[in-house]
Amino acid sequence: MTVIDADLPPPLTPAGCDLRDFPFMPVDVRRLLTSETWVLGNGEERAAAMSLWLESWHQVPAGSLPDHPRMLERLAQTSKWKKVADQALRGWKPCSDGRLYHPVVAEKALEAWIEKLMNSISGAAGNAKRWCLQ
């Protein structure tokens, strides 16, 4: 059961935003390489941060992570979680659905989700047209 916290902002992606069938996650290279997370982080912190970004792409909703320390440690794929956690979680924000969201990953997820919905609508319209003409 999801706990709603009205004092926190709403989730940054819709609850049904599911990109698990999208194997590709777009990365804005310049934005990443000039971000404080990247510039101020060491190799271990960067690797953990990247793992979290990538893992969040296939979470539902996309762009989010569970706000659970042990899960975050596992998803970050590091044995040094306590040392890297603060930097790896830089930019992640708790939201009212009890999950953490990264604004940049959520932005990219929304773009992909809209594309997915548009393709679905386009495909459905094409199928309807084809079947109605028969």
Image: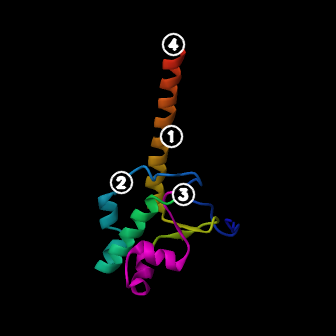
Residue annotated with mark 4: 133
The region drawn magenta spans: 61-89
Q: Nearer the viewer, residue 42 or 80?
A: 80
Q: Secondary structure at mark 3?
A: loop
Q: Nearer the viewer, residue 77 or 32?
A: 77
The x and y percentages for residue 117 are 51, 40
The x and y percentages for residue 6 are 71, 66
Residue annotated with mark 1: 117
Mark 1 against mark 4, which lies toward the viewer? Answer: 4
Disc 4 crowd, CA 10 A, few/some/many (<14, 14-19, 20+): few
In the visual, does 62 lie left or right of 26? right
**Does the residue at mark 1 contact the one at mark 4 (Cβ under 8 Å)?**
no
In the visual, does 115 lie left or right of 28? right
Mark 3 against mark 4, which lies toward the viewer? Answer: 4
Type of the residue with mark 1: Leu
Residue annotated with mark 3: 61
CA separation, marks 1 and 4?
24 Å
Type of the residue with mark 4: Leu
CA separation, marks 3 and 4?
38 Å
Q: Does residue 42 appear in this view?
A: no
Q: For residue 28, what is the image quadrant?
A: bottom left
**Does the residue at mark 2 contact the one at mark 1 (Cβ under 8 Å)?**
no
Q: Which mark is residue 26?
A: 2
Q: Considering only order in the chain, which callout, 3 or 2, is on the residue closer to the N terminus?
A: 2
Type of the residue with mark 2: Pro
Mark 2 against mark 4, which lies toward the viewer? Answer: 4
**Whether residue 122 is situated above or below residue 115 in the rendered picture:** above
